[in-house]
Image (cartoon, rainbow, N blue to C red):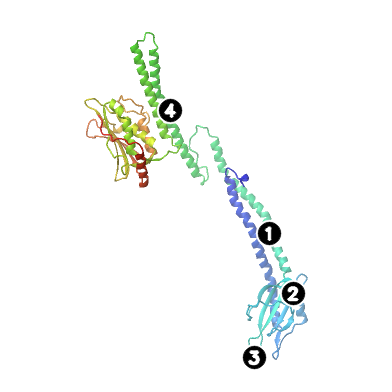
Amino acid sequence: MKIFRREQRSLFGEILDWMLTPLLLLWPISLALTWLVAQGIAGKPFDRALEYNVQALAQLIVTDHRRTQINLPLPARDILRADDSDLIYFQVLGARGELLSGEKDFPRPPEDEKPQPGDVKWRDDEMRGQDVRVAYQWVPLDLPGNPVALALIQVAETREKRSVLATEIIKGVMLPQFVILPLAVLLVWLALARGIKPLHQLEERIRRRSPDDLSPLDDKAVPLEVAPLVSSVNDLLTRLKDSMATQKRFLADAAHQLKTPLAGLRMQADLAQREGTSTDELKRSLQQIGRASIRATHTVNQLLALARAEGSGAQMAIFPCDLARLTMEVIQDSLHRALDKRIDLGYDGAEPGSNGIALDGNPTLLKELIRNLVDNAINYTPSTQDQPGVITARVFAENETGSVVLQVEDSGPGIGESERDLVFQPFYRTLGTDADGTGLGLAIVQEIARRHGADVRLGDTHPDRHPPGARFTVRFEARKDSGLAQAVDMASRSSPPTPSLGPLL
């Protein structure tokens, strides 16, 4: 019933149930088995007495001139008389079934049993409305001309003494169990309470901790079975400590990055409010305010993008994606910036819907990854009218590894090997450059790639040239289900077609 169902399961109660339930179920079974054993034990001495009586009667059978009789003296009859609690009946039948002595109405052995001489046999039967235990034996007779003549001797006894003895045995065995069973339940209860005491001690140690104490728990002071749980908690505490340290560093860096544009806004606003400010000076202050606001807005957008990429608490929505189509859409959106800087921006790779370039991912995050790679290349690629910069994005499938590869390469100054790991850290910017940026783009790229199980590599576009340029390579795992790849192709066909983009000057 739901009324007695708890929302949380008790470990103490669960173990206690599993220990006591078999004990309580086995107890009545033990009673029944003890009763059966007691019945067998109580009947053995009385069965031996009946066997002795049958053998004694067999010694009294005599044959004389083809006549069988039994000489049962009075003392022998006294032996077979009834005692104070039970009645004893007997019967002796000759070879032709004639009654030699005893009760006429004594029940016969089973009809399907073949008479044959041998040891004494027993059976349970009914005599004059009472349950009796019968011992009987077929005795061979020495009759001339009839070598197979057999006499039947039967002795029966009522079962009163047997029941009394069995009851006494049951009392002697069962009464101590009524004392032992509650004592066993109490001992199990105390042992279980003692066994889970380390869990309560661990709970108290955790409760006494301060909120900022993320040091590992001592896994040596807990039972062996709890050690894996404590180890998992320690691992969680370590990752939580690292995450909090990263968040603190991130917040400090974000505050520092936002401080500069906000200070510029305040300074330009103060300059615009001075007395005697000319119209030209006012316009320049407004232009500076506009640039600072754009930079601050860009920084905030990048911070939100990084937070969205790192948001592992929520399940990322996965859809079939055409990486070539997403890349071409980002290239088309970035054309105006590339044209403003006289950069040759183009796409050189597989066409949308080609085989092997479909992957599972979040299209919004994937476009954010591509956009940050392209924006990073535009920001750091110098370009003049005489020597325009070149940026090329491509998507292709690797036949050897079965991966989908995205590459964005430029003709800029490149990134030295000593800085190639540092550029993926938030707010890190390559030294010696005056390009406008927040230092968050590549951190966003790496985080989105990590959430898609992709690998990001950085190298030179032309190692033998100067400047060598920078090439970012992202490898994704391709879809293994061709039917899903067809779904990607159908989805891409239902959207407006994107024109193929070649190099643009």
- Residue 148 higher or lower than 208, as above or below: below
**Which residue is under mark 2?**
88
Asked whether disc 2 touches disc 1, contact meaning CB atoms under 8 Å apart, the reply is: no
**Which residue is under mark 3?**
145
Residue at figure coordinates x 77%, y 77% from the top left: 78
Front residue (pair 400, 151): 400
Query: Dot 2: within a 10 Å radius of its alpha carbon, few (fewer than 14), some, or many (20 or more) residues?
Result: some
Mark sitting earlier along the chain (3/1): 3
Residue 223 picture location, percent across and down = 53, 45
Mark 1 secondary-structure assignment: helix
Residue at figure coordinates x 40%, y 32% from the top left: 306
Residue 320 picture location, percent across and down = 38, 41
Asked whether disc 2 touches disc 4, contact meaning CB atoms under 8 Å apart, the reply is: no
Residue 94 placement: quadrant: bottom right
Mark 4 secondary-structure assignment: helix
The three-letter code of the residue at mark 2 reads Ile
Residue 97 appears anywhere in the view? yes
Mark 2 secondary-structure assignment: strand
Q: CA distance from mark 2 to mark 1?
A: 31 Å
Q: CA distance from mark 2 to mark 4?
A: 104 Å
Residue 437 picture location, percent across and down = 34, 26
Mark 3 secondary-structure assignment: loop
Residue 174's tag is 1
Mark sitting earlier along the chain (3/2): 2
